[in-house]
Image (cartoon, helix red, strand yellow):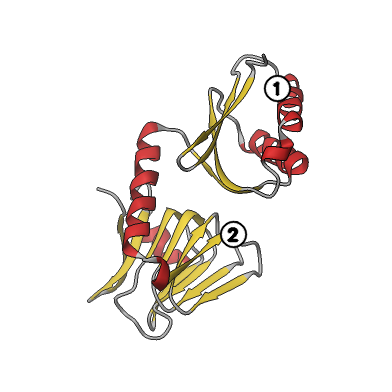
Amino acid sequence: MDSLVTIKSCKYGMEIYLDPEVPFDVLMEHIRNKFRSSARFFQGAQVAVSFLGRRLNYTEERAVLSLISEITNMDIVCVIDQDHEHELTYRRIVEKTLSDIPVRDGQFYRGTLGKRQVIESDTSIVILGNVEPGASVIAKGNIVVIGALYGSAHAGAAGNMEAYIAALSMQPRSLRIGDMEAKQKMFCQNYSEIPGPKIAAIDAAGIYLDPLVE
C-alpha cells in the first residue's frame, strides 16, 4: 500500500495526505500513480481539495493540481487550507450561505473566474472558487465568494442598497453595492489590518468591511 499519498473523501470535497519528508519529485510520481489507478472514480467530478501532512508552496500546489486534473479530468473548484481555525471558518461560511440563500432564490457557480470573464445573476450568487484580477461578478442580490475576490463585484445591481458581498479573502479591484462604489485604494488604506474572511455592506458613510466571523 502506498502510504506516501492517500485520498479520502470528506463533507466538503477531498482530502489528500502527502508525506512531508520525501523529495517533491518523488511525491509527484506517487501522486501520478495513485490518481492514475483510481482515475475512473473521479472523471468529471467537481470538488474542493484539502492537502494534509505537507505544506505546499504556491508553485508546488499548482503543479499537484495540474497533474491531478490532467490525469482525472476532475474540476478542482478550490483548495481549502487545513488550518483548524480556517476550516471552522470555512464551514460556518458555507453553512450560513446555504441557509441564507435558498436554492430557489440563488445560484451557484463552481470554478474560478479568470481575466475578462463576467458572470451575471438575477438573484444572489455563490462562487465556489476565486474571482481573479480582471474578472467581474454582477448580481441583483448578494455575492458570496468561497475563495479569493481579486476582481470586481457588484451586488444589489438593481438598486438594492441592503445587499452584501462576502469572501474568504477580500482584495478586490472594486466593489459596488447598489449605486455606491468603493475602489481598491480605499480598502488598502482603511481595512488592511482586518484578518480573515470579510463582508462588505453599506452604512451612512458608504461601503465598509467587517470580519465575516467574529
Tell me: residue 56, above or below residue 49: above
Of residue 36 and residue 198, the one placed in the foreground of this image is 36
What residue is shown with label 1?
Answer: 27
Q: Quadrant of residue 163?
A: bottom left
Horizontally, residue 142 falls left or right of residue 173, namely: left
On screen, residue 113 above or below 202: above
Relative to 161, is 58 on the left or the right?
Answer: right
Estimate the x, y position of residue 178 in percent, counting from the top left: 37, 81
Q: In the rendered picture of this protein, how many numbered marks are placed on residues?
A: 2
Quadrant of res 66: top right
Which residue reaches farthest front?
Answer: 41
Q: Which residue position holds label 2?
A: 132
Which residue appears farthest toward the left when viewing the image? 204
Quadrant placement of the N terminus: top right
For the point 39% across and 45% down, the residue is 90
Tell me where residue 29 appears, x and y as whole percent: 77, 24
Mark sitting on residue 106: none
SS assignment at label 1: helix
Image side of residue 152 versus residue 73, left or right: left
207 in relation to 212, above or below: below
Asked whether residue 193 is in view, the answer is no
Earlier-in-chain disc, 2 versus 1:
1
Residue 157 visible in the current orientation: yes
- Mark 2 touches mark 1? (CB < 8 Å): no
Please tell me which residue is depicted at 22% across the width and 76% down the height of the picture: 204
Q: Looking at the image, is mark 2 or mark 1 nearer the viewer?
A: 1
Question: Residue flagged by tag 1: what amino acid is it?
Answer: Leu
* Image coords of residue 205 (percent x, y): 25, 74
